[in-house]
């Protein structure tokens, strides 16, 4: 596990940065980006690649484990928020609840023009997903919120469009897929049925929750997902969890490169030009 070391960049108050927020993004090029990440192994390759610095004096509520990295990259103000380690168990705070809370707090405090959710995902080989593939998400939905009551059933699925980025997809030649989100790593038969109903190629544990908050607060959000494990079958006779851990380091390195390319594309552009 790599450490960032002692980087001599003076910490900035989150409130001051929020107060200094520019006008709405449609009136100027994107200048303020928040990246939301669930796992440290997903966060650090991005942090190191675009040279962000940890803020040890963050004004997030006392007691939350969330970690903020920030910096300026090619004139863009970048904040990466990692959900941190669970205070009781010391594992990454994965899942929908931490990601929704982090997204809400980051939007309220940092007033981003654009949110980028960066993370790993499982993929369906039958739908063309291979280990290491990187997808831009077109649609997000849940597959484990089963509420068999009229209208509440649709609320449970919570289907939402991600912010459309046709120019970015074309320029970087990225694959596009629908995403299904649930709070379990395994897949029951009911989950599988609903994932299929969502027409999902990739599956994660955060995306649809982030999409919900971003939609609620009207902040454009894009989702960048890299495939670490296959869902429909085993790879090299390894169960999906083992496959995930085996591929995690290599895939997150490629994911960080893709994030850098996306940020380079965003620089100088209006939201409508993405």
Image (cartoon, rainbow, N blue to C red):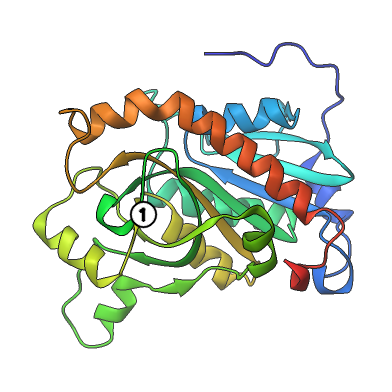
**Left or right: where 197 falls relative to 137:** left
Instruction: From the image, tell me which residue sits under label 1.
Output: 202
Say above or below: 127 vs 62.
below
Residue positioned 17% across, 50% down in the render: 187
* Residue 153, percent from left and from top: 24, 79
Residue 48 appears at what percent x and percent y?
68, 25
Using the image as rendered, state which of residue 253 and residue 180 is in the foreground.
Answer: 253
Residue 192 or residue 98, whichever sits in front: 192
**Seen in the image, is 66 located left or right of residue 196?**
right
Whether residue 103 is visible here, answered yes or no, is: yes
Instruction: Name the quarter where the C terminus is drawn.
Output: bottom right
Instruction: Give the residue displayed 18% in from the left and 83% down from the top.
Output: 149
Q: Point out the residue furthest to the left here.
A: 189
Q: Position of residue 76 (x, y in %)?
A: 84, 47
In this picture, residue 230 sits left or right of residue 129: left
How many other residues sit within 10 Å of disc 1, few (<14), some (14-19) or many (≥20)? Answer: many
Q: Where 174 sits versus 25, above or below?
A: above
Q: Quadrant of residue 29?
A: bottom right
Rendered view: 193 above or below 21 = below
Q: Is residue 27 left or right of residue 263?
A: right
Residue 180, quarter of the rendered image: bottom left
């Amino acid at each position: 596990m790599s450490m960032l070391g002692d980087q001599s960049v003076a910490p900035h108050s989150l409130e001051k940065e929020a107060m200094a927020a520019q006008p709405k993004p449609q009136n100027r090029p994107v200048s303020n980006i928040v990246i939301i990440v669930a796992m440290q192994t997903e966060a650090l390759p991005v942090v190191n690649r675009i040279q962000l610095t940890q803020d040890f004096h963050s004004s997030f509520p006392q007691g939350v484990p969330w970690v903020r990295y920030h910096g300026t990259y090619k004139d863009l103000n970048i904040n990466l928020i990692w959900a941190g380690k669970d205070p009781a168990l010391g594992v990454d705070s994965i899942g929908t609840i931490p990601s929704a809370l982090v997204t809400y707090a980051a939007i309220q405090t940092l007033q981003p023009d654009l949110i980028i959710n960066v993370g790993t995902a499982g993929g369906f080989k039958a739908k063309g997903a291979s280990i290491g593939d990187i997808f831009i998400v077109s649609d997000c939905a849940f597959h484990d919120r089963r509420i068999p009551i009229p209208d509440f059933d649709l609320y449970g699925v919570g289907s939402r469009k991600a912010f459309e980025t046709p120019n970015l997809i074309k320029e970087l030649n990225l694959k596009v897929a629908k995403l299904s989100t649930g709070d379990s790593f395994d897949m029951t038969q009911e989950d599988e049925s609903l994932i299929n109903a969502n027409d999902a190629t990739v599956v994660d544990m955060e995306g649809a929750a982030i999409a919900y908050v971003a939609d609620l607060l009207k902040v454009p959000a894009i989702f960048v997902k890299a495939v670490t494990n296959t869902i429909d079958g085993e790879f090299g006779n390894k169960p999906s969890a083992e496959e995930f851990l085996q591929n995690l380091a290599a895939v997150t390195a490629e994911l960080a490169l893709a994030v850098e390319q996306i940020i380079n594309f965003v620089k100088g552009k209006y939201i409508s030009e993405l």
